[in-house]
Amino acid sequence: MSDLNVRGSSSKAAWLGAALLLFTGCGPSLPPSKPLSQLTPAEAQGHQIFVSKCVRCHSATGVNGLHGPGLFGLYRQKYLPSGAPANDERVTATILHGRTMMPAFGNELDEQQLQDLLAYLHTL
């Protein structure tokens, strides 16, 4: 193989690598979630609800979940994974009424539990 072909292959590989990084979102990452040891009582209650109701499908520490999206940084992004605005109104509606594969939890959570869960989700 000539020296010209090797340089051409190397530059193509470098360009392809740079393009791949650009398209996979190699931007700044979000800071970590609030540590469990620093949660307020309401946030800690919300964490318990998350563990009992949500963790079977959603991850609190990543963007991928088992059956639903990961919820890390949920409120620190402009939009939810569904494309809806990342605000309490939309998240509450999804929790209470469900969405696509997510079941509704409106009959399982009282108002205080819902507020505690939202408080916890804000810490992610």
Image (tube, grey):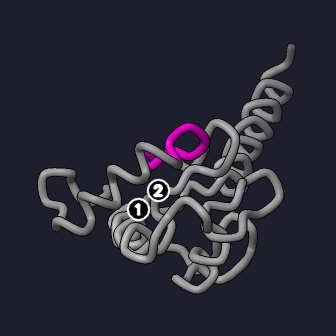
**What's the residue type where badge 1 is placed?**
Leu
Q: Quadrant of residue 47?
A: bottom left
In the rendered view, would you say 55 is above or below 19?
above
Horizontal side of 4 relative to 83 (left or right) equals: right
In the rendered view, would you say 94 is above or below 38?
below
Residue 100 lies, in percent from the top left, at 83, 58
Disc 1 crowd rating (10 Å Cα; few below 14, some 14-19, many 20+) is few
Residue 7 lies, in percent from the top left, at 75, 32
**What's the residue type where badge 2 is placed?**
Phe
Q: Quadrant of the N terminus?
A: top right
Q: Residue at x 13, y 51 (%)?
A: 37
Distance between the alpha carbons at the discs numbered 1 and 2? 9 Å
Residue 88 lies, in percent from the top left, at 52, 82
Q: Residue at x 24, y 58 (%)?
A: 44
Mark 2 secondary-structure assignment: loop
Magenta span of residues: 54-61
Q: Quadrant of residue 23?
A: bottom right
Sequence-first disc among 1 and 2: 1
- Residue 60 forms part of the magenta stretch: yes
Mark 1 secondary-structure assignment: loop
Of 7 and 90, the residue lying toward us: 90
Q: Residue furthest top?
A: 1
The answer to whether mark 1 and mark 2 are in CB contact below 8 A is yes
Horizontal side of 23 relative to 33 (left or right) equals: right
Horizontal side of 76 relative to 112 (left or right) equals: right
In the rendered view, would you say 120 is above or below 88?
above
Q: Main secondary structure of the magenta part?
A: loop
Q: Which mark is residue 30?
A: 1
Q: Which residue is mark 2?
A: 72
Q: Quadrant of the C terminus?
A: bottom left
Of 45 and 27, the residue lying toward us: 45
Q: Residue furthest left?
A: 37
